[in-house]
Image: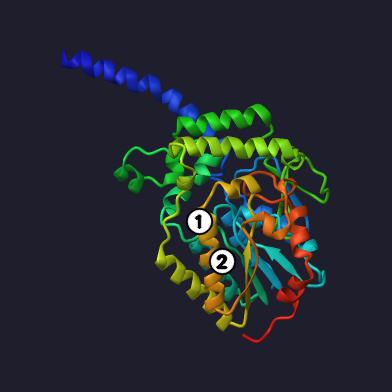
Amino acid sequence: MIEVIKSIGLKAILSILPVMAIVVATNFIVDPANVIHNVAPEVAGYLLRGENVSLIKENFGMRELREEYLHRSKQADIVVLGSSRSLQVRKWMLADSSASFYNASVANAQLDLYQSLYCIFKQQRHLPKTIVFCCDHWLFDMQRVENVQTAAHINTGFSPFKLSSLANRIIPTQFMEMMSFSYFQSSLAFLRVNKSLQQFYPTRDTNDRNMLLLADGGIQYDISIRQRSVEEVRRIVEMDLRRNNAKKKGDPSKFEERKIDSKRIAAFEELLQSMKNDGIRCVLFLSPYHPLFYQNLPSLAATETIFREVAARNNLEIFGAYNPEQIQLTEADFFDYWHPTPEGLARLFAKEQLHSLFFKPKNQ
């Protein structure tokens, strides 16, 4: 009996090996989220030459790209630090086009990212004259780190593959992903739309249909997002609100509840003070939210108050607002519930009083 069981077990193992070999080989070759392949050096090379990069496959490590770029770039007068909510900030929005500019924002950015990028500035000895911080509502949230850890996997349509905590300590996570059937599905999905496996190409055409990584560090969304009507955006916002309110049993006051961590506030202020001590002008920026989203997220006003208090304590300028009505933006100025359009941001940046924030630094 034991021999029969062993025989069956051996046959099962032998039968699954070819399948696993196909899964691993496909995941390794296609690698839709660039878990194994580091494309940051090549992409950064195009951007450093002043070319934009058209992304056929949008999922890659933006953080790795920023770090690669900053290690190889020259000093920029003005640097933007933030999340995807500030990636639409462009050099052409600034009143003084002679100032060098770089947008170093990264989707889902956390405080540790800002600290890491600032260390690169100091190591390379190319400190900017001005740093503009996009103050996202999750920056001080105690829950956010756990959420962000899986954001890359969620965005690429697969879940992290884990056998056990012991196995993950023995085998690096990126190699574990090669055995993931979920990742295999993402690989097949990518092959259906792009059999050449090309991920990106350099271009100077800003009318490209794909998402563009711009030479100044910003991004331009693909044409399907850029052409969304006001009605389409409103439907996106309403759908997200319905989904989240259902999770919170219809109570909008509980929508995306925030748990503020005082230690993170202190760490943020320490970083700001370090920059000021290095002679950098720090400016805080409150990127607006879609009007309907703002109305249904009561915690935004409280978080904005905290940022304004931080600015006051540290004698820093702060501009913008979470509430779009305060800065004369409408539903037409958003791609979705929390990403403003470049046109909307341009109107905000064009206000005369902002010019002195970037180009006439006061002594600090």
Disc 2 is placed on an element classified as: helix
Front of the two marks 2 and 1 = 1
Q: What residue do we see at 44% from left, 23% from top?
A: 18
Vertical order, 123 against 162 (above or below): below
Q: Nearer the viewer, residue 75 or 289?
A: 289
Q: Quadrant of residue 82?
A: bottom right
> Foreground: 73 or 91?
91
Q: Which residue is mark 2?
A: 117
Mark 2 Cα-neighbour bin, 10 Å: few <14, some 14–19, many ≥20: some
Callout 1 amino acid: Trp
Q: Determine which residue is flagged by label 1.
A: 138
Note whether residue 119 is visible: no
Task: Measuring from the top left, give residue 79's x and y in whole percent.
Answer: 67, 68
Question: Residue 98 placed where, x, y %?
Answer: 82, 72
For badge 2, the amino acid type reads: Leu
Query: Looking at the image, is mark 2 or mark 1 earlier in the sequence?
Result: 2
Mark 1 surroundings: few (<14), some (14-19) or many (≥20) residues within 10 A: many
Examine the rendered structure and indicate whether residue 247 appears above or below residue 44.
above
* Quadrant (top left, top right, bottom left, bottom right) of the N terminus: top left
Tell me residue 167's x, y (percent). 32, 42
Among the 4 quarters of the image, the one containing residue 133? bottom right
Mark-to-mark CA distance, 2 and 1: 19 Å
Relative to 264, 364 lies left or right: right
Looking at the rendered structure, which numbered label has been put on residue 197? Answer: none
**Residue 196 on image: x %, y %:** 69, 33
Question: Quarter holding the C terminus?
Answer: bottom right
Color scheme of the displayed model: rainbow
Q: Is residue 9 visible?
A: yes
Q: Say if 101 sits above or below 193 in the image.
A: below
Contact, mark 2 vs mark 1 (Cβ under 8 Å): no
**Is 10 left, or right, of 187 in this rendering?**
left
Q: Residue at x 50, y 39 (%)?
A: 244
